[in-house]
Image: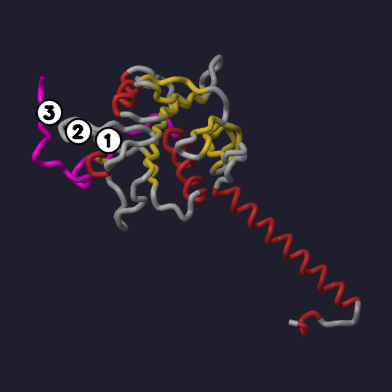
């Protein structure tokens, strides 16, 4: 039996490439995981035990190149190291395999159903999410769960991820002024979390309603012969 001998020196994440230096061939490969990360930051504002990487290298062996998904989520890790943030994700440093990885399919498949699927399974990633809006006969969103070393497609949209405590799903919406189908996070009741833009709109609407109420109250006071400014 061969004995595995760990290297004497493990490079730190700062010494490793932060991606595979291959440019994305589709804007969605950046926008979709970026939106998921932004929503998560608002859904878990006080949690510091998670990290969502976008186009960042995941290193599992110092002698092998990184795996670079479009996005990935890890739980039970430090959200921030310091103000320089993470440059890459080294599993021997984090001591945690990502709980979920995301691949956004471009015009042509990039081994999402072959080598990448095998790599993520061997790594022990619990959820493998594949999204392709170009499909016509199959669902745009596929969520695969690792069961006995094999990925099993999960039904539904959104799909509940109990180990993460959220659901992920696809629906039409507006992000950065673009109307199309996006990926979102949902709670255990199936309610979608708002995007940053939507939260800003809700806050603006609430401010407008409050202002209108204040104006109506001031008019009522004036009708009663009272000066609303003198009551402040």
Residue 186 or residue 54, whichever sits in front: 186
Element under disc 1: loop
Marking on residue 61: 2
The range drawn in magenta is 1-27
Element under disc 2: loop
Q: Which residue is mark 3?
A: 4
Mark 2 and mark 3: Cα distance apart in space? 12 Å
Q: Which residue is mark 1?
A: 21
Marking on residue 172: none
Membership of 10 in magenta stretch: yes
Q: Residue at x 85, y 72 (%)?
A: 219
Q: Is residue 215 above or below residue 224?
A: above
Element under disc 3: loop
Which comes sooner in the sequence, label 3 or label 1? 3
Find out whether the residues at labels 2 and 3 contact each other: C-beta distance under 8 Å: no
* The quadrant where residue 62 appears: top left
Q: Is residue 171 left or right of residue 20?
A: right
Q: Residue at x 73, y 82 (%)?
A: 232
Which comes sooner in the sequence, label 2 or label 3? 3
Residue 77 x %, y %: 34, 47
Membership of 54 in magenta stretch: no
Mark 3 and mark 1: Cα distance apart in space? 30 Å
Q: Residue at x 37, y 40 (%)?
A: 74
């Amino acid at each position: 039996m061969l004995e595995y001998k760990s290297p004497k020196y493990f490079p730190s994440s700062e010494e490793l490439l932060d991606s595979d230096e291959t440019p994305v061939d589709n804007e969605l490969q950046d926008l979709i995981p970026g939106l998921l990360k932004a929503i998560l930051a608002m859904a878990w504002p006080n949690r510091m035990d998670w990290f969502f990487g976008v186009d960042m290298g995941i290193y599992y062996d110092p002698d092998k190149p990184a795996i670079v998904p479009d996005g990935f989520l890890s739980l039970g890790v430090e959200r921030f190291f310091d103000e320089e943030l993470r440059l890459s994700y080294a599993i021997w440093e984090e001591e945690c395999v990502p709980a979920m990885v995301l691949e956004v399919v471009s015009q042509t498949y990039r081994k999402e159903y072959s080598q990448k699927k095998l790599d993520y399974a061997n790594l022990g990633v619990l959820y493998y999410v594949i999204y392709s809006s170009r499909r016509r006969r199959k669902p745009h969103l596929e969520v695969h769960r690792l069961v006995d070393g094999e990925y099993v497609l999960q039904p539904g949209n959104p799909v509940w991820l109990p180990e993460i405590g959220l659901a992920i799903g696809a629906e039409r919406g507006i992000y950065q002024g673009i109307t199309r189908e996006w990926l979102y996070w949902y709670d255990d009741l199936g309610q979608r979390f708002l995007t940053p833009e939507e939260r800003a709109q809700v806050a603006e609407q609430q401010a407008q309603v409050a202002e209108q109420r204040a104006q109506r109250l001031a008019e009522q006071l004036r009708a009663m012969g009272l000066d609303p400014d003198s009551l402040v």
